[in-house]
Image (cartoon, rainbow, N blue to C red):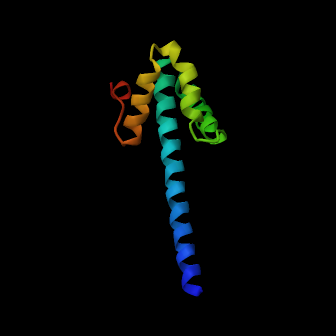
Amino acid sequence: MTNFSKAQEATLRQYFQVEERRFFDRVSADRSAGAVVAHCLGLGAAETDAFSDRVIEAGIRSRDGRGGFDFLASQIGACGYDIEQLRVCYATLTQGAIPLSAAA
């Protein structure tokens, strides 16, 4: 019985570590994508930080973790981006690369 408890505890610990990593990865992607969109909108440094914080907050408040993406999707029209470009930006960020629009 003790071995089962230890195995179950190890499985839960691993699950929580994976979920925590996913959370931090999503927050990082939300912050970076928010900074790209804020730059495109012409916001200054302080406004960019506040905008990125709103993107992160939207992601945290959503049940599926996509709130940041959904928030940015509602904002990108003013940038001239479309939803597919935002998806590519997120895909690039989650792979650890710098999106082209931020690199330039």
Residue 46 in view in this figure: no
* For residue 82, side relative to residue 95 (left or right): right
Task: Report x, y in % for residue 89.
Answer: 41, 30
Task: Report x, y in % for residue 70.
Answer: 57, 29
Task: Report x, y in % for residue 53.
Answer: 60, 35
* For residue 43, side relative to residue 104 (left or right): right
- Pick the front one: 84 or 99: 84
> Residue placed farthest to the bottom in the image?
2
* Position of 69 relative to 22 (above/below): above
- Pick the front one: 87 or 79: 87
- The total number of labels drawn is 0
Q: The C terminus is located in which quarter?
A: top left
Which of the 4 image quadrants contains residue 102? top left
* Position of 12 relative to 54 (above/below): below
* Position of 9 relative to 87 (above/below): below
Task: Report x, y in % for residue 22.
Answer: 50, 50
Q: The N terminus is located in which quarter?
A: bottom right
Which residue is drawn at the image coordinates 33% and 29% (left, top)? Answer: 103
Residue 66 in view in this figure: yes
Which residue is drawn at the image coordinates 35% and 35% (left, top)? Answer: 98
* Position of 16 relative to 99 (above/below): below
Which residue is drawn at the image coordinates 56% and 74% (left, top)? Answer: 8
Which residue is drawn at the image coordinates 54% and 26% (left, top)? Answer: 72
